[in-house]
Image (cartoon, rainbow, N blue to C red):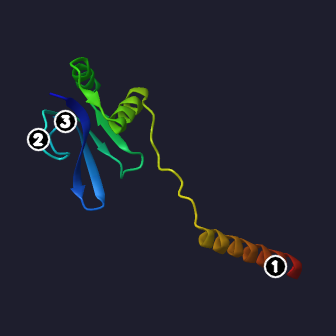
Amino acid sequence: MAVKIRLARHGAKKRPYYRVVVADGRMPRDGRYIEEVGRYNPLTNPKVIDINLEKVDEWISKGAQPTNAVSHLIDVARSGEVITEKKAKMSKKAAAKAAAAAEAAAEAAAEAADAE
C-alpha cells in the first residue's frame, strides 16, 4: 500500500481550505484518509499552517511519502517562517494609469508652488 501525505481540499468554491492528511495513494483527493495531521489556510494573511510535526515524522518513518506541496509546508512549519502574500504585478494598462496619475499630481504640485 502506497501511503501519501497530501492535501485534501475543503471549503467553498474559490475559497479553498486544506487538510493535511495521510491517505492511501489509490484513494481520491478528498476521499477516505487514514489520519489528519494538519491544516492549511492559504486565504489568510499571513497564511495559517498548522501541522503536527510529530505525527508527520512518525508517518514518514513508516514509509509515507509527502507530496511536493506538503513537503514545502512541512519545511515552512519547521523553520517557523511567516508566509505573506506575493505582490501582484500591475498590468501594463494599470501601470500606465498610475504613471499618468503621478505625472498629473506632480504638475498640480508644481502649479501650486508657482502660484505662491
Q: Position of residue 105 (x, y in %)?
A: 73, 75
Q: Residues within 10 Å of mark 1 (few under 14, many from 20)?
A: few
Please say if the residues under marks 1 and 2 sit with CB atoms less than 8 Å apart: no
Q: Residues within 10 Å of mark 2 (few under 14, many from 20)?
A: some
| Drawn side of residue 8 relative to residue 67, left or right | left
Residue that mark 2 sits on = 32
| Residue at x 68%, y 75% (from the top left corner) | 101
For label 2, the SS is: loop
The tag earlier along the polypeptide, 3 or 1, is 3
For label 3, the SS is: loop
Residue that mark 3 sits on = 25
| Drawn side of residue 46 relative to residue 7, left or right | right
Disc number lying in front (3 or 2): 3
The quarter of the rendered structure image containing the N terminus is top left
Q: CA distance from mark 1 to mark 2?
A: 68 Å
Q: Position of residue 108 (x, y in %)?
A: 77, 78
Q: Position of residue 40 (x, y in %)?
A: 30, 42
Quadrant of res 90: bottom right
The tag earlier along the polypeptide, 3 or 2, is 3
**74 and 67: which one is in front?**
67
**27 and 49: which one is in front?**
27
